[in-house]
Structures are given as C-alpha cells and as structure tokens.
Image: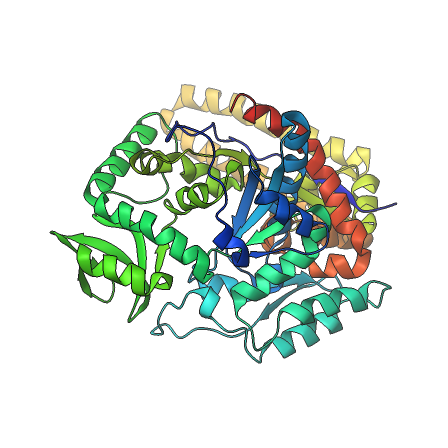
C-alpha cells in the first residue's frame, strides 16, 4: 500500500474579483530577473516567464522553518498543476510562481515547525524566541542563526533511517544555514524542492523588486485618504451581504508599511502627512517620495496591497489561496480600482490529508474516515468501543433508559394531578436514575476500553497523524519527515492530487 492523498475541499471558494484595470497582463520587467530563483525544469519556465504573452499562476506564503506546514507545498503544487492545465487550454505559456512574503515580520510564527517522530509523537522544533521589546525585523533580514544546527540534529534523531534520509536532510542543511536569512533559506529550499514541477520562486524583497514596487506604493500613499474610505465602504458592503471582511480598515491606516526605528510599521494618515503607528515617526509625502528613491527596501505592502503589487509585477491570471486569503481577498477590490490594476482570479489550493499506509490500515480496520478523528481525544474511541459492547448489555441499557424515561413521565403526570409541587422532586428523581444508567454505561465502556487497548492505541496514533495538536495535519506538520520516509513519491503523490483539482479550477478562469 502506498501513500494516499485524501482531499478535504476548501469551502466557500472566492468568486473572481471585480474588474480593476483594462488591457492585457503586464510583461515581467527584465530587471526583475535577479529576484527569481529556479532549479531544474523550473529554469526553463523562468525563461518562458519573460517571453511575450506569458502568464503566471501564483501562490505565496511567508517564510517558515524547514518550509513550514504542509499547506505551503500544497499551495505551490496546486499552482503548478493549474498552470499546466491552463497552458494546455489557452495554448499560451503559463508559469507557476511562488511569492515568498519575506517582508512579513511575524517571527513567532516563522521560528518553529512541528514534525511527526518515529514514535508517532508530535515534536516542536524552534530556533529561538524574539524579545517582546525587539524591533519587528522583516524575515528577509532575520538570520537563521546558529540554533539551526540543533534543530537539524533533532530532525535527524526523530526520523527513520531510510534510503531517502541522506538526500532529504542534505536538502535542509544546504538551505537552512546559520549564515543566511529566513526568507532566502525558505525561497531556495522551495525552489530546489519544487523545481521538478516547474515552480519558479519570486523574492519581492530583492532590491530589484523593491525598486519596481516603490512607485506603486507611493501612488497608494497619494490616494491614502480615498483608499481608506473606499476600503471601509467595501468592508461594509461585504458584511451587509453576509460575507467576511476579516482585515480591519477605516481607521486612517494606509496600505503601506515602512521600516522604522521599531521595525516594520504601518504608515497612518496624520493630516497632510503620515506617522508610523508604533514609533510615531512623522513624514510628509515629499519625505516618503525621496525615501522611496533612496531606500526602497524600507517600503512594503500590507496584506490588502500585497496581491495588487503582485498583479503589478507579474502577469498573474490566477492566485492559488488558502481559506484565510479567500476570505480577505474580496476586500482588495478598491485597491485594484484606484491603481488601475487588473485583478487575478482567486482560487482554492488543494487541501487534505497525506495518509500513510499504517494509518490507512487503521481507518480501514475500524471503518472510519479521516474527518471522524476530528473529535476530542477519547470520544471516537469510546464510540468504537461502545459498538463492541455485547448486544445483550447494549439492549438492556437502552431498554432501561427508555423505560425509566417513560415511567417517570407517567409518574410526573399522576403526581401533578395530586399536587403540582410534586413535579420537581419527581423530575429530580428521574434525572438521578438516568444519571445512574449513564454511569453504568460509562463503566461498561471503560472496562471494554481496557479489553480493547489495541483499538484505543491505534485510533490515538491515527489522530496524532491526521489531527496533530487537534488541528488538520496540513496546518501543523512540516514536509521533511515525509521526504525522509517516502522520498520523491511524497511530492509526486501530492502533485497528482492537485492535478485532479486543477481540471475543475481551470474552468473558473475561462473567459478571462
């Protein structure tokens, strides 16, 4: 039995964004070439991206330790499969591009990862913690640091000795080095890992990309007041139509971030000028215009401006998104309109479980689905054990419960006819009796659990695998242990699952 990929489709896929700009998609500027990273077959895709008429299917994520949770790979592989499907349909070059959001400053999210050990335990590996008073340094300037040596040693101890182990650990060691930063480590690791599938990685934090983005971010600052009002109105429209608007707007915040004395900071409208939200540094629009020429690396888009900047720099036909992104992308519409940018079509990534053979056997043995494990620990086990209860005992408990319920109701009716105040004590006695039955049933199940230790243990291990820490596997576990166990089969299996989804997604972009 081989590795299985069981889909759990993302609900509420977004509809195409309202039209922004007119005309064809932008052509990638030649000066942006150094901002891209590509390996293997993806190198040819990078050349094609600069050809006339080329399009892109994009996805992206902020940097993570050892490439972060599994959904990072699923995003990129969905983009790769969709690009190939669209190229066949459109007869036009379509290249998958992964945007590494290295401007992100959330080190607490990027500094750790979780893996499943040989003993089926969840282990948290972390680089270090950032002091609460430390500047919010963007991840592209945050060093990996010396503690990566301990992290990689822990991975080596936690994973089995397989034919793929040396290659998988070597890949991690090549890219996650003490002397590099988290964003570059992430970008280069993904580029090598996904090069086979044609995925090109883009670093918007590269000086060439920062320089290209700066005029557009300044244009957003020039319209900051107008955009603030338009974004607030858009959020109101979405909420009135019972759709989500998760990103707070309308508080005078511009869609542009500036790195200042306290790190990455939001530029807030302050009369005719701007002030950084946390550090209180004040700039006129003229100051910011000069700064954008002299130090463009200090500027970055916020969460609502980022997809717009992507559509400015890349000929993006579609963006492969996770559920959180699908929720907030409809809020971006005023940004596209104000800057005259053609929006991409947001589409859901592949979502699901990587089911190892040992887990598949447990699911088959007890006739359960992966989603059945999404219950508090012990609840499913109790239900399965209860199904093993001898029929005579199960029937006796059921009959006793029904009889007590019916007879106490008859007694209540009769007692009320004598004296209405008797209703409460009779109902109290009924509750005590039914509680006693439940306690007996609980003890029966408890004894059955002891007799079914194997069942309880196997189901618990399956839950650890598919719902580690009580969350879906794809949102917690990193890919490295799967690469050690299964080698190329892991990503190829995931890609095949994404191909099946891509056929359906491609139809959503037709007519664009």
Asked whether, in this view, residue 30 is left or right of residue 266, the answer is right
Image quarter hosting the N terminus:
top right
Q: Is residue 451 visible?
A: no
Give how far across and how far down residue 255 sits, in percent: 30, 48
- Structure colour scheme: rainbow
Relative image position of residue 257 (x, y in whole percent) = 32, 56
* Residue drawn at point x = 27 percent, y = 46 percent: 219
Q: Point out the residue furthest to the bottom here.
A: 146
Q: Is residue 216 left or right of residue 116?
A: left
Q: Is residue 407 left or right of residue 27?
A: right
Q: Is residue 191 above or below residue 178?
A: above
Q: In which quarter of the view is residue 482 placed?
A: bottom right
Give 227 or 46, whichever is nearer the viewer. 46
Q: Is residue 108 above or below residue 228?
A: below
Q: Residue at x 67, y 28 (%)?
A: 503
Indicate the quadrant where residue 334 lies: top left
Name the foreground residue: 309 vs 394: 309
Vertical placement of 90 versus 470: above or below?
A: above
Taking the image as drawn, is residue 115 in sight? Answer: yes
Give 197 or 315, whichever is nearer the viewer: 315
Question: How far across and how far down the image is residue 465, in percent?
Answer: 70, 53
Residue positioned 50% across, 74% down in the render? 143
Image location (x, y in percent) of residue 22: 39, 28
**Res 498 → quadrant:** top right
At 82% from the left and 53% from the top, the residue drawn is 454
């Amino acid at each position: 039995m081989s590795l299985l990929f069981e889909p759990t489709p993302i609900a509420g896929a977004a509809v195409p964004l309202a039209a922004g700009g007119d005309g064809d998609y932008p052509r990638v500027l030649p000066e942006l070439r150094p901002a891209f990273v590509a390996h293997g077959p993806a190198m040819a895709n990078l050349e094609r991206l600069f050809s006339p008429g080329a399009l892109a299917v994009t996805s992206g994520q902020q940097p993570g330790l050892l490439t972060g949770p599994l959904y990072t790979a699923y995003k990129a592989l969905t983009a790769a499969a969709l690009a190939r499907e669209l190229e066949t349909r459109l007869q036009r070059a379509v290249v998958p591009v992964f945007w590494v959001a290295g401007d992100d400053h959330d080190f607490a999210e990027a500094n750790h990862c979780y893996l499943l050990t040989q003993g089926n335990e969840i282990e948290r590996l972390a680089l270090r913690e950032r002091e609460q008073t430390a500047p919010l340094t963007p991840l592209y300037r945050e060093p990996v640091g010396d503690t990566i040596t301990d992290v990689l040693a822990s991975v080596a101890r936690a994973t089995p000795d397989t034919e793929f182990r040396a290659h998988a650990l070597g890949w991690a060691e090549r890219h996650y080095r003490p002397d590099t930063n988290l964003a570059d480590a992430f970008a280069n690791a993904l580029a090598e890992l996904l090069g086979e599938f044609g995925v090109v990685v883009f670093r918007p934090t590269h000086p060439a990309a920062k320089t290209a983005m700066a005029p557009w971010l300044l244009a957003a600052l020039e319209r900051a007041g107008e955009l603030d009002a338009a974004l607030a109105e858009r959020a109101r429209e979405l909420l009135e139509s019972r759709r989500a608007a998760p990103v707070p707007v309308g508080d005078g915040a511009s869609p542009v971030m500036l790195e200042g004395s306290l790190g990455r900071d939001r530029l807030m409208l302050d009369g005719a000028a701007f002030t950084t939200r946390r550090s209180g540094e004040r700039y006129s629009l003229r100051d910011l215009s000069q700064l954008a020429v002299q130090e463009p690396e200090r500027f970055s888009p916020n969460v609502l401006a980022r997809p717009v900047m992507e559509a400015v720099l890349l000929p993006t036909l579609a963006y492969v998104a996770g559920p959180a992104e699908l929720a907030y992308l409809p809020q971006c519409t005023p940004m596209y309109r104000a800057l005259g940018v053609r929006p991409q079509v947001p589409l859901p990534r592949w979502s699901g479980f990587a089911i190892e053979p040992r887990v598949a056997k447990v699911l088959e043995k007890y006739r359960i689905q992966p989603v059945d494990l999404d219950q508090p620990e012990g609840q499913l086990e109790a239900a399965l054990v209860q199904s093993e209860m001898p029929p005579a005992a199960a029937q006796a408990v059921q009959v006793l419960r029904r009889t007590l319920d019916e007879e106490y109701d008859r007694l209540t009716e009769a007692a009320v006819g004598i004296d209405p105040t008797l209703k409460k004590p009779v109902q109290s006695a009924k509750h005590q009796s039914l509680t006693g039955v439940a306690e007996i049933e609980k003890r029966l199940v408890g004894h059955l659990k002891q007799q079914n230790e194997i069942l309880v243990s196997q189901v618990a291990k399956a839950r650890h695998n598919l719902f580690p820490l009580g969350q879906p596997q794809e949102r917690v576990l990193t890919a490295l242990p799967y690469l050690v166990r299964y080698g190329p089969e892991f990503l190829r299996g995931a890609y095949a699952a994404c191909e099946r989804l891509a056929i359906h997604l491609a139809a959503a972009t037709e007519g664009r």
